[in-house]
Amino acid sequence: MKFERRLTKKAKVDMTPLVDVLFMLLLFFMLTSVFKMVPGISMKLPTSTTNQTVSLSRLQVVAVSESEIYVNSTKTGIDGLDAAIKAAIAGKKPSDFSATFQGDKTAPYQLVVSVLDALRMNGIEGVSLITSASGKKP
């Protein structure tokens, strides 16, 4: 009499190496990504026909109104702008910084001048103005 063996090999996939590889890929992409936090403000930028692409600087100033100005992600007003700029460049040489200024299309011209003056008084000379492209070239 011949008995049939009941022991059969079952194919089994070990998930541990797969999870390890996926975790390492996730970690790699998280560490090499650059997240730039810009305040979520609804703005209408002025248009320009001679605009150029500039790289983002380490100091970003966004002016919506005199009571709502953002230095990087810190909200301040026109009165606290000088202190916010000093806090953003604390411990570093101001000549190492370049700033980008983004102002609302309807912002008063005096607000733009006040922000630029505050940047210059803190030693930041290189300021780029952010505009939107008008589509027409000169």
Image (cartoon, rainbow, N blue to C red):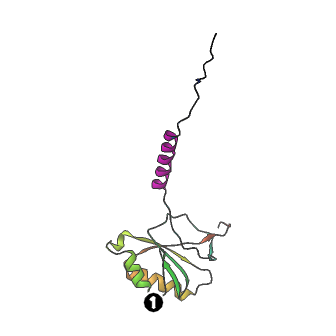
- Give the residue at the far top of this rendering: 1
For residue 41, side relative to residue 33 (left or right): right
Towards the viewer: 30 or 7: 7
- Give the residue at the far front of this rendering: 1
Q: Residue at x 62, y 84 (%)?
A: 106
Q: Quadrant of the N terminus?
A: top right
Residue 58 x %, y %:
43, 68
Residue 117 x %, y %:
44, 84
Task: Residue 134: name its quadrant.
Answer: bottom right
Q: In the displayed structure, would residue 28 be above or below residue 98?
A: above
User: Which stretch is magenta?
Assistant: 16-33
Q: Residue at x 48, y 74 (%)?
A: 73
Q: Residue at x 48, y 44 (%)?
A: 20
Towards the viewer: 19 or 87: 19
Q: In the displayed structure, would residue 44 be above or below residue 22?
A: below
Is residue 28 shown in magenta?
A: yes
- Which element type, helix, strand or loop, lies under badge 1? loop
Total tally of numbered discs in the picture: 1
Q: Amino acid at mark 1?
A: Asp
Is residue 52 shown in magenta?
A: no
Towards the viewer: 39 or 59: 39
Residue 80 x %, y %:
44, 87
Task: Residue 104: name its quadrant.
Answer: bottom right
Q: Residues within 10 Å of mark 1 (few under 14, many from 20)?
A: few
State the predominant SS element of the stretch in magenta: helix
For residue 49, side relative to residue 36 (left or right): right
In the rendered image, which residue does mark 1 sit on?
Answer: 79
Q: Quadrant of the C terminus?
A: bottom right
Residue 37 x %, y %:
51, 68
